Image (spheres, helix red, strand yellow):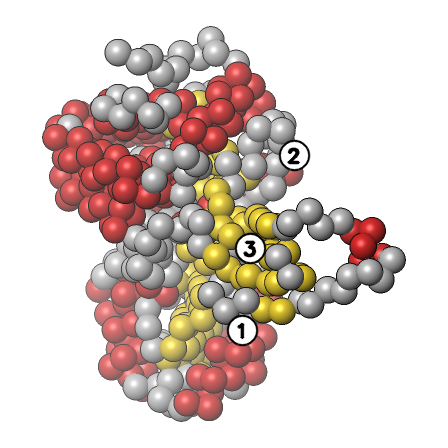
Amino acid sequence: MRQASTGTSQIPVAELSRRARVASRQLARLSNDCRNEILTKTAKTIEENAQRILDSNALDCRAAQLTIAAGKMSSSMFARLRLIPRNIEEMATRVRDVARLPDPLGRRLAATELDENLVLYKETCPLGVIGIVFESRPDVVPQVAALALKSANALLLKGGTEAFHTNQTLVEIWHHSLESFPSVPLEAVELLHTRDDVMELLTLNHDVDVIIPRGSRELVDFVSRNSLIPVLGHGEGICHVYVDRAADVEKAVKITLDSKTQYPAACNAVETLLVHQEIAAEFLPRAALELMQAGVELRACPNTLALLKGSKLIPAGEPDWATEYSDLVLSVKMVGTLDDAIAHIHRYGSGHTETIVTENNESAKRFMKEIDAAGVFHNASTRFADGFRYGLGAELGISTSKLHARGPVGLEGLITYKYKLFGGGHTVAEYVSGARRFTHRTVVQ
């Protein structure tokens, strides 16, 4: 049986990253059919080991209860940590969904004839080695491992200590599946364990191509400050729902509730509700009632407090507009115009996901055009900002960067491209001397 290094902290991270680089080159040789076969096998293995995964997660959750009692873990982080049987089914489903996606590699993006018998092709290829540093959510392991394998990238994972047993088990299951495929090195997926491992990983820019942090703003900021490797991620998910004066109240209430309560711990949950003053009297009393019945604490601006006299609202302070609660807490602010809503979002938003609820197409067009965010929605919940819901199969995280990848990062975020030039003995000197001339003709593919 082949031996992987998972759980063997004595192997230096530099050596693991070197092995991952070698493994990535072996992955690049695999056919798409082979990669899909591995993913299908792994999905089945996850299902067959469901109870083992749940038992490992139970160990982590029992330890987490003590951490919560000591005030060192939030309820939202615990919600991300805890797994139930349905979550295991979803893990397997995500892996199969990735297997069904088209092959992202070797796609010809452009073809240009530079001269007769001198043709330049631009084709997709893997990044190489991906480092993922994440907190709490063990479902990250199968999602990112599936995306990495499908795109022929090797993966170095570092999860939070709160999910140690679950992450360990998931990687062991992944390796067990890979053992059936001798052409795939087990070093293609490795698990790191300590903070020191992370610090060393962030310096290995020779063997690691990109670092993707998933977790709190503090985690992302820490990784960004300390990494010598390009970082792809988002610091906060301060998302807004703006209820325009031309909104359909039924839609607005439904969208607001879903955006806040469907899964409040998610980074795409709404944190601030902006309401046009002309619809506030009709919308806010009903919305506030339904939100509070769902257990949401409302922190309101002075105009909202005045409108909803007698309601159990908390006055909002300046910090509330810039806070990612990740919990059943929602800031509410009344605005005078669409311009005011856009200005507020640009001041306090994190560039993640913003929604306008309106029946006025011109207002919607303005909002969609002028808001600077990875996701801008019209009459839809912010919770749709998700790789699976976008049809990406799974996601590595959400990027608020404007370079390389933006929004939910799926396979497209794990590939780059290379130029392939095919000639017939051509030399640059011939073109410098004028003996030959470039044609620069686009080749129809």
The residue shown at (47%, 8%) is 10
Residue 21 placement, left or right of 250: right
Residue corresponding to mark 3: 122
Q: Is residue 438 above or below residue 129?
A: below
* Residue 19 in picture, x, y percent from top left: 48, 21
- First in sequence, mark 2 or 3: give its number: 3
Q: Which mark is residue 228?
A: 2
The residue shown at (48%, 42%) is 126
Badge 3 amino acid: Lys
Mark 3 element type: strand
- First in sequence, mark 1 or 2: give its number: 2
Q: Mark 3: give few (<14), some (14-19) or many (20+) Cα within 10 Å.
A: some
* Residue 290 in picture, x, y percent from top left: 24, 70
The residue shown at (26%, 21%) is 179
Badge 1 amino acid: Ile
Residue 6 placement, left or right of 237: left
309 vs 254, nearest the viewer:
254
182 vs 90, nearest the viewer:
182
Disc 1 or disc 2, which is closer to the eye? 2
Residue corresponding to mark 1: 371
Q: Which mark is residue 184?
A: none
The residue shown at (57%, 43%) is 231
Mark 1 element type: loop
426 vs 95, nearest the viewer:
426
Instruction: Please state, as top left, top right, bottom left or bottom right, where the N terminus lies in the image.
Output: top left
